[in-house]
Amino acid sequence: MKIRYAEVFDAFIITKIHCDTWQKSYANLIPQEILQKRAFSQERVLRWENRIKEQKQFVLVAENDEGIVTGFVWGGIGREEKLSYQYELYALYVDDKAQGCGYGSALINAFAKEIKSDFYLFALKGNEKAKRFYLKNGGLLKPEFSKTQQEGDIFLEEECFVFLKE
């Protein structure tokens, strides 16, 4: 396993992992109309290319022993004013065929090592698999920071997890 900074050529596979995993992970938690809006597209690939080029945020990828990207982590400056932590992990996704092999844990650890600070993330309430994963990897559930996001007529509840620098 290798963790490295993402390169522009990784944008396609990052988008594929992001969209495919999103569809599978949230199929029973989010209405289909919202899931369809998050489907793979060339526009999404271009957004990832731009994020990687700008280098304003951290985008790290995990590769298996054959050099195939199996997951990614994306984070940067925290976006929640009510939280006093400087950094936020915006997204962490691992291809479903590679889940349970340590890639997610390695990505969280690499992100923490890069920022050298406490950080937080939000996970969709009801995603018990993600909740167990974050708790197992040192996340502290902070219900007082939970939030609700609105997508059209739909309200999505998100739980906050805080990771403290050791």
Image (cartoon, rainbow, N blue to C red):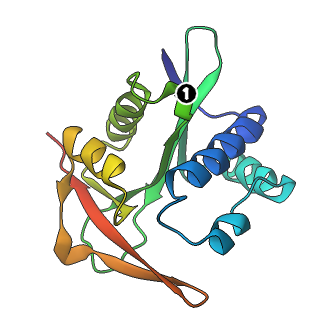
Horizontal placement of 42 versus 138: left or right? right
Horizontal placement of 103 versus 9: left or right? left
The location of residue 152, given as percent across then percent down, is 61, 88
Q: Is residue 164 above or below residue 2?
A: below
Residue displayed at 24% across by 38% down: 137
Residue displayed at 46% across by 55% down: 76
Horizontal placement of 76 versus 53: left or right? left
Q: Is residue 159 above or below residue 152?
A: above
Residue displayed at 54% across by 52% down: 57
Q: Is residue 99 visible?
A: yes
Q: Could you say which is closer to the camera, residue 66 or residue 100?
A: 100
SS under mark 1: helix
Residue displayed at 27% across by 73% down: 83
Horizontal placement of 115 versus 38: left or right? left
Quadrant in which residue 141 is drawn: bottom left
Q: Residue furthest top?
A: 65
Quadrant showing the C terminus: top left
Q: Residue furthest left?
A: 166
How would you rate the neighbour count of disc 1 (Cα within 10 Å): few for under 14, some for 14-19, many for 20 or more?
Answer: few
Q: Is residue 56 visible?
A: no
Q: Residue furthest bottom?
A: 153
Q: Residue furthest front?
A: 28
Quadrant in which residue 56 is drawn: bottom right
Q: Could you say which is closer to the camera, residue 132 or residue 15?
A: 132
The location of residue 116, given as percent across then percent down, is 29, 42
The location of residue 113, given as percent across then percent down, is 33, 34
What residue did someone put label 1 on?
Answer: 97
Question: In the image, what residue type sits under mark 1?
Answer: Lys
Q: Is residue 116 above or below residue 156?
A: above
The location of residue 20, given as percent across then percent down, is 65, 46
